[in-house]
Image: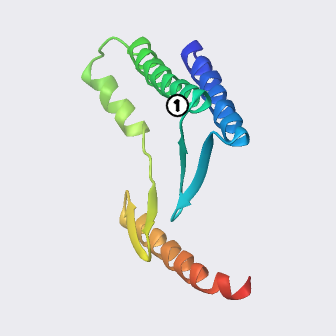
Amino acid sequence: MSKYHLLSMMFFILGLVFFVLGVLSGEIKTGFIVVFPFLVGSGVYAFLGVFFVIIAILLFMFGLIRSKVASSEPPFDEDEKRDIQKEKSVKGGGVVLIGPVPIVFGSNWKIAVLMMVLAIIIIVAMFFLPRFL
């Protein structure tokens, strides 16, 4: 872990601490809209919380850019490039539920079908779960 990522994590935790202090002091109000949490506040704790979280995000992005630049290797010939491309094979997929509408994606058709089955299972579970609670 680079020093920028460590600093980013420290600033993010510090921002969260200020948010918690603001909520406990009554300076920051919290709530949910559908499933998205939000914070509303004004004052020192709210300002410092937002400030440190933004600094943490900027440091994290700067650390990613620095690590990509530092890890860049000199160019190599085409034979080595073909060998590396053959070795790397990643398969994946996912399900995004927007309300009851599933959006399914996958790197090949087998994974896409598996994700469709998973989406159906999740939708059925969400339908029957409130009845059992």
Image x and y of residue 27, in percent: 63, 39
The quarter of the picture where the C terminus appears is bottom right
Q: Is residue 98 above or below residue 126?
A: above
Reply above or below: 33 against 16: below
The residue drawn where x is 45% and y is 60% is: 94
Q: Position of residue 114 (x, y in %)?
A: 48, 70
Of residues 57 and 38, the one nearer the viewer is 38
In which quarter of the view is residue 110 placed? Answer: bottom left
> Circle 1 sits on which residue?
50
**Corner quadrant of residue 129:** bottom right
Residue at the (54%, 28%) spot, across then down: 47
Q: Residue at x 60, y 28 (%)?
A: 12
What residue appears at the point 52 percent right and 31 percent down from the top-left corner?
50
The disc labelled 1 sits on which kind of residue?
A: Val
Mark 1, Cα crowd under 10 Å, few <14 / some 14-19 / many 20+, is some
Q: Is residue 57 left or right of residue 125?
A: left
Above or below 101: residue 84: above
